[in-house]
Image (tube, rainbow, N blue to C red):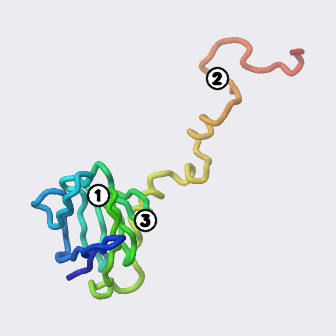
Amino acid sequence: MFGELVPVGGGDPIPLLQKTLLLGRRESCDIVLRFSNVSAHHCQFFIENGYWYVKDLESRNGTRVHGQRVERKRLDPGCELAIAKHKYTVEYSPSDLGASGPPPPDEEMISQILDRSLLERAGLSRRERELDSTDDRYDATNDEAGQIDDPDKLT
């Protein structure tokens, strides 16, 4: 056994018997949850570098880790996993699964950071400034008169 999912609030734990598992409502899944809010093929569990990961398979009601919806996330021992609205605690020992040293970086966090440019993260993106800007600038493609304020002209 490579770990288990322990239902929050009580119930029988679900053993994680293989290194790759498919969870869903269908009988063909490795872990079957017979609930109407669980998708037919809801998510996939797999071990990588001694840690369990979960990958949501575009389920309707989502997969959450500590309350945040995820697409792919490392599951640390003791973390809370929600499949639709069914909550479980993930129990396993990374060292028993071959992990050594600190945990690998979490790809979900890395992708959130890398999806935006450094300028966007610093709030200096030209696009954001254009949307926030209310000042009227000179438009070189516009031939209309009166684009430049005359400081000598009384308003």
Q: Earlier in the sequence, mark 1 or mark 2?
A: 1
Viewer-nearest residue: 45 or 142: 45
Residue 27 lies left or right of residue 24; in this view the side is left
Give the amino acid at mark 2: Asp
- Residue visible at 34% across and 65% down in the picture: 87
Dot in front, 2 or 3: 3
Q: Which mark is residue 56?
A: 1
- Residue 132, by quadrant, is top right
The quarter of the picture where residue 4 lies is bottom left
Which one is nearer the viewer's eye here, 60 or 112?
A: 60
Q: Secondary structure at mark 2?
A: loop
| Disc 1/disc 3 C-alpha distance (Å) | 15 Å
On the image, the x and y values in percent for residue 79 come to 39, 72
Residue denoted by label 3: 66
Relative to 52, 19 lies left or right: left
Q: Mark 2 sits on what residue?
A: 139
